[in-house]
Image (spheres, helix red, strand yellow):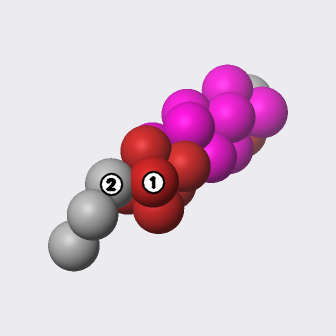
Amino acid sequence: MYDRVLAGVAVVTRKLGCAPH
């Protein structure tokens, strides 16, 4: 169940990490 959630969080984290603050 959490596999998809973790995958989604990972994608969002990458986007936020790549995005300039």
Mark 1 lies on a secondary structure that is helix
**Residue 5 inside the magenta-drawn segment:** yes
Predominant secondary structure in magenta? helix
Amino acid type, residue under disc 2 in the picture: Ala
Please give the name of the residue rendered at 78% of the width and 33% of the height, measured from the top-left corner: 3
Looking at the picture, which amino acid does disc 1 mark? Cys
Q: Nearer the viewer, residue 15 or 7?
A: 15
Q: Are marks 2 and 1 in contact (CB under 8 Å)?
A: yes
- Circle 2 packing at 10 Å, graded few (<14), some (14-19), many (20+), is few
Asked where in the image residue 20 lies, by quadrant, the reply is bottom left
| Residue in front for this viewpoint, 3 or 15 | 15
Locate residue 5, reporting x and y percent.
60, 37
Residue 18, which numbered label? 1
Quadrant containing the N terminus is top right
- Name the residue located 45 percent from the left edge and 54 percent from the top edge: 18
Let me know if residue 8 is in the magenta part. Answer: yes
Residue 6 in view: yes
The circle drawn on residue 19 is: 2
8 up-or-down from 14: above or below: above
Left or right, residue 20 beside residue 12: left
Residues in magenta, as a range: 3-12
